[in-house]
Image (cartoon, rainbow, N blue to C red):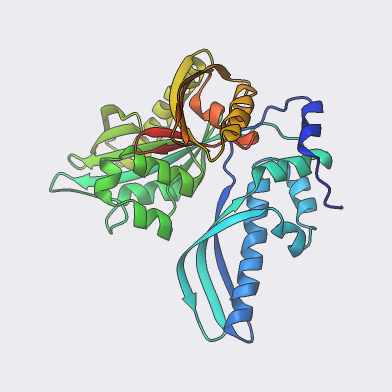
Amino acid sequence: MKLKFFVAVLLCLFPMISWAEVSFDAEVKAFAEADNAALAKEQALTKANREAFLKVASRLTTKANVDELDKLTDEQIAHFIRSASFADEVNGATTYEADLTVNINGKLLKQYMQENNMLEMVSAPAQILIVPLFADTLYPDKVLWEDGNVWMSAWLDKGLIKSGSFDFKVIPDIAPNKNLLSTYKAANMTRDVYDRLVEINGIKDVFVVSAVRAGRNNLVLIITSVPDNVEKRFMVTDENGQTLEKAIAETVGYITLTMQEKNMSENTRTGYISAVFRYQKLKDWLNMEKRLKSVPQVKNVKTESVGNGQVKLNFEFSGSEASLRSSMENLGIFLQSDNGNYILR
């Protein structure tokens, strides 16, 4: 296959495609051993980029198409890499290893897949990120990454859990997550921490699930959706000693029903956003306004003020904010949260 990409203006000629809301970030581990440290790092990063590229591609298309994408050369794959962040780098005399978060240029990838007839799968199960906290009535302090979190161990033992159109994923034990999320921050999650958690894991639907042991066969469950902090509490009892397993089943059932009701509601709702756009030249704003109005969900863009290098605006949108962000990103518009304020980039 040759690397051929559509000119952006030509994309307007193609029918709109309904894409699943996916993340274009991938967490991978880089490792290689070579004759020297520099060569080891080069080989490790090359392999990590390929792994991240294929991991993201697998969220958009079939395995057969991913196998075709794997035939691209390392140089071709490099075109799709937008950025990478590093954690826990270890440089040896002949080895290199690190935890990487690789960001793939999603717009470029989808253009390439469209040209090569790889758009066979246009939907995928939505992912739910579970953050399991555990406490015992005898030891009231909760634990997350610390030893003794039998609640997390029970979730991990279950592996990937599928329920309806949702896949349940336990928060990965990787350096970016552990550096970000202490037990306290998990139990009292702010919007800034949530936004960073989404960036790291690529999952927008996050539930903090606390289990407090209250007797041998009893668990008090506290399920909190973030960042809206809607909380549900109930008791789980199992006389056969399978309390953790029963608690997981009831948690999955409750979250599945909650998400299904939320999605039905969001499909018909209308939202409003106030944002700021910073510009160097006024024509930058005029171009952004035109692109913003071309987003299918965006209605009634209203400029509140212009001056001092920034525009304050309000706009109405239909559907969910997650769907809005996805459509905007497809057009190269990014809506970011800065201490609770929205910024257009």
User: Residue, x 47% and y 24% (percent of image)?
Assistant: 313
In the image, 36: left or right of 181?
Answer: right
User: Which of the pair 122/280 is nearer the observer?
Assistant: 280
Rendered view: 321 above or below 169: above
Q: Can the viewer see residue 173?
A: no
User: Which of the pair 266/326 is nearer the observer?
Assistant: 326
User: Residue, x 57% and y 20% (percent of image)?
Assistant: 298
Residue 286: which quarter of the image? top right
In the image, 209: left or right of 16?
Answer: left
Query: Residue 230: percent from the left, percent from the top?
Result: 31, 26
Rendered view: 291 above or below 299: below
In the image, 328: left or right of 314?
Answer: right
Query: Residue 331: percent from the left, percent from the top?
Result: 65, 34
User: Residue, x 73% and y 46% (percent of image)?
Assistant: 63
Rendered view: 188 above or below 276: below
Query: Residue 15: percent from the left, percent from the top?
Result: 78, 25
In the rendered image, the residue lying farthest to the left is 138
Rendered view: 13 above or below 186: above
